[in-house]
Each structure stands twice: as C-alpha cells, then as structure tokens.
Amino acid sequence: MANPAENKQGRDFEREEPEFVEKLVAVNRVAKVVKGGRRFGFAALIVVGDGKGRVGTGHGKAKEVPEAIRKATEAAKKNMIRVPLREGRTLHHDVSGRFGAGRVHLRTAPSGTGVIAGGPLRAIFDCLGVQDVVAKAIGSSNPYNMVNATFEALKAIQSPRQVAARRGRKVSDIVAQRETARGGSVEKTAE
C-alpha cells in the first residue's frame, strides 16, 4: 500500500490543476534565416491564475503553436506571485509599474465598476480574480512590456496587514488612515 501522504499530495495536485484560468495573450511567428531559407517557429505569451489572488506569466517558443503554449503555461505556473486583494474583488491601493517603454497605472474601484482595462491587462485581471479595477497602459503597446509592467505594479501592492506589521501598528489604524485620506468618515470603535 502506498504512503497516505503521497496519495494526498497527488490528489491535491490533480484537483488544483483544473482550477487555473489560462489566457493566451499573444502568439508571434518568428523566423530564423538559414542557408536554405527561413525556419519558422512560434512564441507564445500566457497568463495563468487561480482567480483568488495568484497569477503568473510565461513565455514559450517551439516549432508548433500548441507546444509553445504548453511551454509557456508551464513557465507561468512556476512564476506565480500572490497579490493581496481588498474584499477579494479589487486592489488595496493605486499603483504604477514600469518595464522598458511600457508604463501602467492601476487604480482601485468601487464595487460594480468592473474591469476597465484593455488587451493583456484584462487577461491578467481575469486570471487574478479582480472584479473592479481601472487600468491604463501608457507608452509601449507591446504585450510583453505591458504584462511585465503590470506584474511590477502588482508586486508593489501591500495589504494593510503588511503595512501595519512593518510600522508596528494596528491594522485598524492603517485602514482608518486610508479612509480619512480619501475623505470618508470613519467612526472609531471603543477599545
């Protein structure tokens, strides 16, 4: 009989696979010039996420499109990052990211706004599980630069819990500061 821990890991892995959302962002046909002419290959850019705050991006190259997509998907699953989400639907704060000539600005949005983003950014937010966000890409429209700039921005997001731990304060103090900075009124609870 097999070790129960091995069975559990195998079962969890099989159950975890279908939960990933995969979005194909771009496929490029690339040519290598050789003595006899050109040799064509394909490059794929994929975004993979679990819809609950984890997302990753991958790039794969191969002679055929399905093989390039498979390689990109494997790379994306290895390069996943965790992004803290507010109420499981939007970002905690506004943030900007830059990669090469591409810049992106990501803004939090109230409930019901939806995903206001174009192209590769929309694919990232769909995989991430964000339901309300406003995003603007400035500069490069190259999907590789846009995706990498978005990931730089997402890596910079900090939850109130992380900020409170770094400053040695309570989470409620950090949230209260955020609300007063936005102009909202927050009632202090008696401690």
Image (tube, helix red, strand yellow):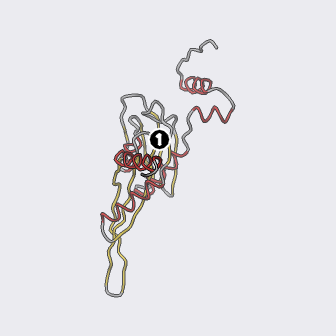
Which quadrant: the C terminus?
top right
How far across and down, in percent of the image, does residue 47 sit?
Answer: 39, 52
Count the labels in the image: 1
Most extreme residue toward the front, as rendered? 1
Q: Nearer the viewer, residue 151 or 78?
A: 78
Where is residue 10 drawn, in percent x and y? 41, 50
Compared to 168, does 79 lie above or below? below
Asked which secondary structure carries label 1, the reply is strand
Where residue 163 sits, quadrant-wise, is top right
User: 110 and 173: which one is in front?
Assistant: 173
Q: Residues within 10 Å of mark 1 (few under 14, many from 20)?
A: many
- Residue 144 screen position, x and y as percent: 43, 58
Q: For this rendering, which residue is in front, 166 or 186?
A: 166
Image position of 53 with respect to 164: above or below: below
Please give the name of the residue rendered at 65% of the width and 34% of the height, measured from the top-left corner: 165
Q: Residue at x 49, y 51 (%)?
A: 149
Circle 1 is placed at which residue position? 106
Residue occupying the point 30% across, 63% down: 66
In the displayed orientation, state which residue is furthest to the top.
Answer: 190
